Image (spheres, grey):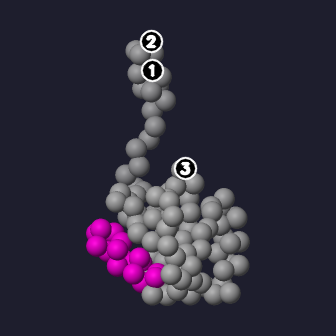
Amino acid sequence: MNIFVLLYNSGTDNEGIHSIELKGKTIVLMFEDKDDATRYCGLLEAQDFPLPKVEMIDIDEIKAFCIQLDYDCRLVEKNFIPKTPEDRLLISPPQKNLEVDNWGEESDNKKDIDINSIKENLEKLL
């Protein structure tokens, strides 16, 4: 069965898939209907989120991908009607998005963790 997912930088080494965080779990959204996926993209764009590309893919590929990374996947069926607040996230993105600039790339300006400074700060709390 083919479904639709939202991909960033499709076909590049820096490709990413759109997901949401729910109760500490990463959930990859899969859309049964291309129009629903396209509408979700528009809602992301309206929130100044980078615009993903709607891609058709086999559902088994996404399920295997999710299992490998310990993600969950949720199928948003055509004409889906949410029944809970969590279900609403399947048809409308959350108001707050995580930063996605340069995901998958090593940052040159990563701060080194200074264990001694952390230890000293923790000791000051005692």
The residue positioned 40% from the left and 15% from the top of the image is: 124
The residue positioned 46% from the left and 37% from the top of the image is: 113
Q: Which residue is mark 2?
A: 126
Q: Which residues are magenta?
A: 36-52
Q: Label 3 near label 1: C-beta < 8 Å?
A: no
Q: Label 2 near label 1: C-beta < 8 Å?
A: yes
Quick one: label 1 or label 3, which is nearer the N terminus?
A: 3
| Cα distance between the residues tagged 1 and 3 | 26 Å
Query: How far across and down, in percent of the image, does residue 66 sit?
Result: 65, 67
Seen in the image, is 22 located left or right of residue 73? left
Seen in the image, is 73 located left or right of residue 102? right
Tell me if residue 13 comes above or below residue 26 in the rendering.
Answer: below
| Cα distance between the residues tagged 2 and 3 | 30 Å
Residue 117 falls inside the magenta stretch: no
Q: Amino acid at mark 2?
A: Leu
The residue positioned 42% from the left and 26% from the top of the image is: 117
| Cα distance between the residues tagged 1 and 2 | 7 Å
Query: How far across and down, in percent of the image, does residue 9 sit?
Result: 45, 78
Q: Residues within 10 Å of mark 2 (few under 14, many from 20)?
A: few
Q: Amino acid at mark 1?
A: Leu
Mark 2, mark 3: which one is toward the viewer? 3
Q: Quadrant of the N terminus?
A: bottom right
Q: Which residue is mark 3?
A: 24
Q: Residues within 10 Å of mark 3 (few under 14, many from 20)?
A: few
Q: Amino acid at mark 3?
A: Gly
Q: Which residue is mark 1?
A: 122
Element type at mark 2: loop
